[in-house]
């Protein structure tokens, strides 16, 4: 026979408040922001990919090689 949820079990499942009040006067700048180059992007690699590409240089080299094989498109021809 299955155990049914009690009201106390349900209370633990939903521990999110309906609304949160943040004090932005206590906010601090992102300490990691200075490590990202101007115009750069941060991309999270899946673990299996990260085992192969262990440095930003290796990822960029492969992506540049892939881009070189792609057909040239006009920058103004973006898909909507």
Image: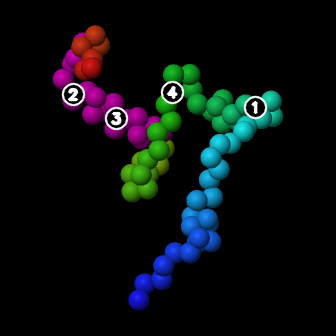
Q: Which residue is mark 4?
A: 40
Q: Which residue is mark 2?
A: 70
Q: Relative to 63, is 69 on the left or the right?
A: left
Q: Position of residue 8 (x, y in %)?
A: 62, 71
User: How many other residues sit within 10 Å of disc 1, few (<14), some (14-19) or many (≥20)?
Assistant: few
SS type, badge 3: helix
Q: Position of residue 78 (x, y in %)?
A: 27, 17
How far apart are the alpha carbons under marks 3 and 1? Answer: 39 Å
Q: Main secondary structure of the magenta part?
A: helix
Q: Which residue is mark 3?
A: 63
Write down the region rendered in magenta: 56-74
Residue 51 in view here: no
Residue 2 in view here: yes
Q: Which is nearer the N-term, disc 2 or disc 1?
A: 1
Whether residue 62 is situated above or below residue 7 in the rendered picture: above
What residue sits 66% from the left and 36% below the top?
Answer: 32
Name the residue furthest right. Answer: 26
**73 or 23: which is nearer to us?**
23
Name the residue furthest bottom. Answer: 1
Q: Which is nearer the N-term, disc 4 or disc 1?
A: 1
- Magenta run includes residue 64: yes
SS type, badge 1: helix
């Amino acid at each position: 026979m299955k155990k049914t949820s009690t009201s106390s079990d349900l209370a633990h499942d939903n521990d999110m408040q309906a609304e949160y009040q943040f004090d932005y006067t206590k906010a601090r700048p992102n300490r990691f922001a200075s490590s990202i180059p101007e115009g750069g992007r941060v991309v999270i690699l899946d673990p299996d990919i990260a085992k192969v590409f262990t440095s930003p240089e290796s990822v960029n080299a492969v992506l540049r090689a892939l881009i070189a094989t792609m057909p040239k498109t006009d920058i103004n021809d973006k898909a909507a």
